[in-house]
Amino acid sequence: MVHIDGYRGLAWFMVSDKDRSPCIFRRFDELAARNLLYLQSQLLAIEDKLKELDVDHIAAPLSVKAGLRNWNGMETDVDETCRQSMMERTALILKLRETMREYREMLVLEHQVRAIERPSSRTLEAVRKCFNNVTSTLRPGIPALDGLNSGIFNDTNDLLSLRVVTEDDRLTRFLQNTFPVLFAKRTPAADIEAAQKYAGRPGLDDSLLYYSERRLHACVAIIYIVLSSLLLFGAMFNLYFVDSNPKRLGFIAGYTVVFALCVGFLTNARRAEIFGACAAYAAVLVVFVSGGLGGGGVPG
């Protein structure tokens, strides 16, 4: 197990995996919402103040009203009694411009952050153990960072993962979470030496395991190839030896349902894509039967 000590060791551990799975950080959702509320309140105050100035300027002299129709007019010299009001309006408008830009930029950024996925439970558990330097259930270890930083991974709902997502369909996630031992690989010797250099202390063994993305994607590709071949050739093989039209319709319906379930539950296909794929699959089977390739053909 790596002994992580300090920011340097934790930073090395976060980037030690190629897909950056350990790169887990706080979302600070509550603080982000509070910041947006503060900016919103500032805009509300500016809006209310502008409305007050609009009401006050209704009965203002013509020299002041000219500034309400022309920006350059707000900077012209007016009598002393109106100059302060015009300067106040100008300063308020400039403040509005700055606050509105910051508010909307934060809205866009918050929307983008919300789209970042949370870490998986298995990855978070491994990161917590390494962060806390847990060597056994009897010895909890010491966190890599002190003070308030020692609890940065405690709140599961307030974390995000900067993992590089390649092919992350449902089948890939299922295999990764259910059978991780099939795709685990030992830490290379070069990485072990780097860990001893950067993690903070020596004494690192080779017990740290990583997922082999290449092996996982190869396994998923093989499963997809086998399933697609079986669903297409298997359906044709069964239909070839069936002479009854009602049975053929039943086989076509059954295989289409199985095909839809595979596409819907194993891939990230959208509903429209599922409908299109099922229609194409059923059409192939119907053409196969109606073409007379089935055992007895379709009676005229």
Image (cartoon, rainbow, N blue to C red):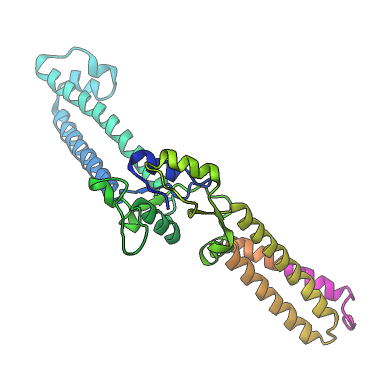
Stretch of the chain drawn in magenta = 281-300
Inspect the magenta stretch and tell me whether residue 47 lies in it.
no
Q: Position of residue 276 (x, y in %)?
A: 67, 63
Residue extending farthest to the front is 203
Q: Nearer the viewer, residue 56 or 290?
A: 290
Front one among 87 and 216: 216
Residue 71 % position (x, y): 29, 21
User: Is 74 located above or below residue 92 in the figure?
Assistant: above
Q: Please tell me which residue is depicted at 22% across the width and 13% down the height of the picture.
A: 76
Q: Is residue 25 above or below residue 184?
A: above
> Is residue 125 shown left or right of residue 236?
left
Q: Percent x, y for residue 165? A: 53, 50
Residue 284 magenta-highlighted: yes
Name the residue nearer the viewer: 83 or 267: 267
Toward the top, the furthest residue is 77
Q: Answer with left or right where residue 134 lies relative to residue 77.
A: right
Quarter of the figure with residue 247: bottom right
